[in-house]
Image: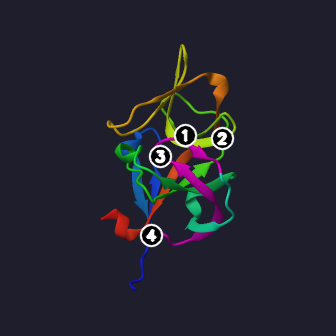
């Protein structure tokens, strides 16, 4: 079996997410918790898992963790099924930011977050998928995407 080296993509600030990723070298690695899966599609039940993953130290902030992506709703932001996303734990997001959101305290999903007059729109980055509309009280932001770890065979 060939040695598969992951590709590390760090988010560059102030650039739309689809173009914001910059590949970085994995010269100084730090272990962070891999806490489970997040759906890039229909929300899935939050099922915490205990694990860890090695990521470049420069991708780690004070409250950093990782989640494995399942689904294709964020492909236009260059986040694919099987990627591991690096999350900075936050309780709020700016309009249009890509966030991990908990719905009704039970399900989690990865979407772009938009605050609208009638509530919140969780917008996929895939034109084949419809947005999810919810009331403000139904959601809780639990983190923002800061990086992606992609296995080499997925990056081709």
Judged by depth in the image, the label closer to the viewer, 2 or 3, is 3
- Residue placed furthest toward the left: 156
Image location (x, y in percent) of residue 77: 39, 44
Callout 1 secondary element: strand
Residue 142: quarter of image:
top right
Q: CA distance from mark 1 to mark 4?
A: 23 Å
Q: Marks 2 and 1: CB-CB under 8 Å?
A: yes
Q: Earlier in the sequence, mark 2 or mark 3?
A: 3
Q: Earlier in the sequence, mark 4 or mark 3?
A: 4
Q: Which residue is mark 4?
A: 6
Callout 3 secondary element: loop
Q: Earlier in the sequence, mark 2 or mark 4?
A: 4
Image location (x, y in percent) of residue 44: 57, 46
Q: CA distance from mark 2 to mark 3?
A: 19 Å
Residue 151: quarter of image:
bottom left
Image location (x, y in percent) of residue 140: 66, 34
Callout 4 secondary element: loop
Label 3 crowd (10 A; few <14 / some 14-19 / many >=20) = many
Q: Which of the numbered marks, if any, corresponds to residue 40?
A: 3
Q: Which of the numbered marks, if any, corresponds to residue 90?
A: 2
């Amino acid at each position: 079996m060939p040695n598969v080296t992951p590709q590390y993509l760090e988010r560059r600030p102030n650039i739309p997410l689809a173009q914001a990723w910059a590949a970085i070298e994995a010269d100084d690695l730090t272990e962070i918790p891999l806490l489970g899966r997040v759906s890039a599609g229909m929300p899935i039940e939050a099922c915490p898992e205990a694990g860890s993953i090695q990521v470049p130290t420069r991708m780690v902030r004070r409250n950093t963790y990782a989640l494995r992506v399942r689904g294709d709703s964020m492909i236009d932001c260059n986040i694919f099924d099987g990627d591991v996303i690096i999350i900075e734990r936050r309780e709020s997001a700016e309009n249009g930011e890509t966030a991990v959101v908990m719905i009704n305290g039970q399900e989690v999903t990865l979407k772009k977050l938009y605050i609208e007059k009638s509530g919140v729109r969780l917008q996929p980055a895939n034109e084949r998928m419809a947005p999810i509309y919810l009331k403000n009280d139904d959601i809780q932001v639990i983190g923002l995407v800061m990086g992606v770890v992609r296995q080499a065979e997925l990056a081709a």
